[in-house]
Image (spheres, rainbow, N blue to C red):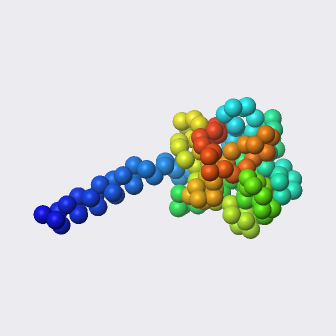
Amino acid sequence: MRIRSILSLAAAAVAVAALATPAQAADAADGAYFIRDVRTGACLAGGEGPLGGHIEPCNPGTVWEVRNQGDGLAQIVEARGGNRCLALSPIRIYPPAVWVDECGRQPDRWTIQGEASQEPVAIALGRGELGNLTTEGHRAVLSPDGGPQWIMQRLG
């Protein structure tokens, strides 16, 4: 009887963990996107310098490619060429800033929580342990309080 109770608890824990795992839009969402802030409609842009991530009117320079990494994580790559990914800035400030750097140089693998076709989604660095992508004024930053605030507008 005691073993059956333990097995029931273990099965319930597995079921709860499965339900708590966010949908990974990155698994099915490779392609080019505008990543729009749901509040303003403006787009995520890479910008220049270590505090470069910011929000600006959507334009050809604010197009991103989502590249699924096969493990539920994705890289968000500038579509205008090169191998530059949205990443954690090396400048240690609070809230942590994002910028664009050579892919693989800084933490640059993201979890897209939700379905890209069902708006909005949350975008978290890593599996969320490093925070969610959000805005502070016109800057893009990471915050433990960030949530679903991005519209993934597929292009093409």
Q: Is residue 72 above or below residue 145?
A: below
Nearer to the camera, 52 or 83: 52
> x and y percent of residue 33 in the render?
68, 43
Left or right, residue 84 beside residue 67: right
> x and y percent of residue 34 in the render?
71, 40
Is residue 79 in view from this perspective? no
Q: Residue at x 53, y 57 (%)?
A: 72
Q: Residue at x 23, y 63 (%)?
A: 6
Left or right, residue 135 beside residue 3: right
- Farthest residue, direction top: 40
- Farthest residue, direction right: 49
- Disc tally is 0
Left or right, residue 34 beside residue 60: left
- Farthest residue, direction left: 1
> x and y percent of residue 76 in the render?
68, 53
Q: Give the quadrant of residue 14.
A: bottom left
Q: Residue at x 79, y 45 (%)?
A: 139
Q: Is residue 75 above or below residue 115?
A: below
Q: Residue at x 43, y 50 (%)?
A: 20
